[in-house]
Image (tube, rainbow, N blue to C red):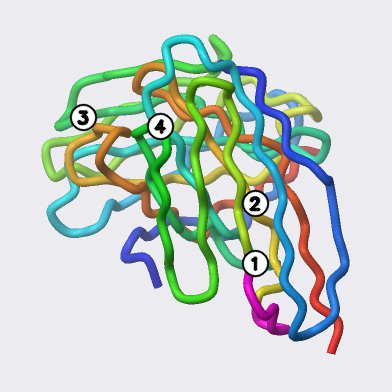
Amino acid sequence: ILNVEQSPQSLHVQEGDSTNFTCSFPSSNFYALHWYRWETAKSPEALFVMTLNGDEKKKGRISATLNTKEGYSYLYIKGSQPEDSATYLCAPSNDYKLSFGAGTTVTVRA
Amino acid sequence: DSGVTQTPKHLITATGQRVTLRCSPRSGDLSVYWYQQSLDQGLQFLIQYYNGEERAKGNILERFSAQQFPDLHSELNLSSLELGDSALYFCASSAGGDVKRETQYFGPGTRLLVL
C-alpha cells in the first residue's frame, strides 16, 4: 500500500471559477493512477485512468495531468458548477492494487 | 447506476458475531474488489478476485475472508466482529482486473454497524 497525499484536504470555490488540486505518490515502480469522484451518499465514480508520464486526460470541464517522474498528478475543474461538489480521490498503483488517498473535498458555492 | 449490486445496504450486529456481505459484479466483469471505508481512514483495499481465484490481497484481517463463485458473484465474510469493524464496505468490479487499463465500477456499499 502506497503513501498517497492529496492537498488541499478541502476547498471552497465560487461558481464559475476554476480550481485545481494535487495528488502526490511515490514515483518508484509507478504502474497507473486512477481518479475518482465521490458524491455524498453515492459510490465512487471513475474519472480517469492514467499510465504515461505527461498524460493528460479530459472529461467535460474536468481534466488531469500526470508526472510519474516526480510523483504527482493535478486535477483541474474549469468553470466550477454546484454539481462538481464532491470528494475527488486519487489512487496510484505500483502493482495490481490501488492505494486511495484521503481525497480533496470540493464545495462549489453558487 | 454502476451495474454493481451489493446486499444488504445496511447491517447492524453485535460484537463477536459473523456477517456475510454479497456483491454481484457488472455483467461481463470477471474481477471483483472489496474495499473498507472506516470513519478515520480512506478507502482501504482488502482483496481482489479474478474469475474465481484470489489475485491480490491488501490489508485484510485474518478474521475476514472472501470468495468468488462460478457465477462471479462474491461474498465477504466478517467474523468475530469488533466495534472497529464498523465501516462502509464497497465492492467494485472491472472487466479483467488490470489497473493499468481498466476503471473499477463501485457498488452502493454496505454500511456495517457493530454494537
Distance from Cα at disc 1 to Cα at disc 2: 16 Å
Q: Are marks 3 and 2 on the same chain?
A: yes
Of all chains, the one bearing label 4 is A
Residue hosting label 1: A39
In this rendering, would A70 be left or right of B31?
A: right
Tell me the amino acid under the disc marked 2: Arg
Please tell me the numbered disc located at residue B111: 2
User: Between marks 3 and 4, how big is the CA–CA gap?
Assistant: 28 Å
Taking the image as shown, residue B12 lies to the left or right of residue B54, namely right
Q: Earlier in the sequence, mark 4 or mark 1?
A: 1
Asked whether disc 4 touches disc 1, contact meaning CB atoms under 8 Å apart, the reply is no
Mark 1 element type: loop
Nearer to us in this view, A47 or B9: A47
On whether disc 1 and disc 2 are found on a single subunit, the reply is no
Residue drawn at x 73%, y 64% is: A19
* Residue at mark 4 shares a chain with residue at mark 1: yes
Where residue A28 sits in the image (x, y, percent)? 49, 10
Residue topped by disc 3 = B50
Measured Cα–Cα span from mark 1 to mark 3 = 28 Å
Residue at figure coordinates x 83%, y 46% from the top left: A8
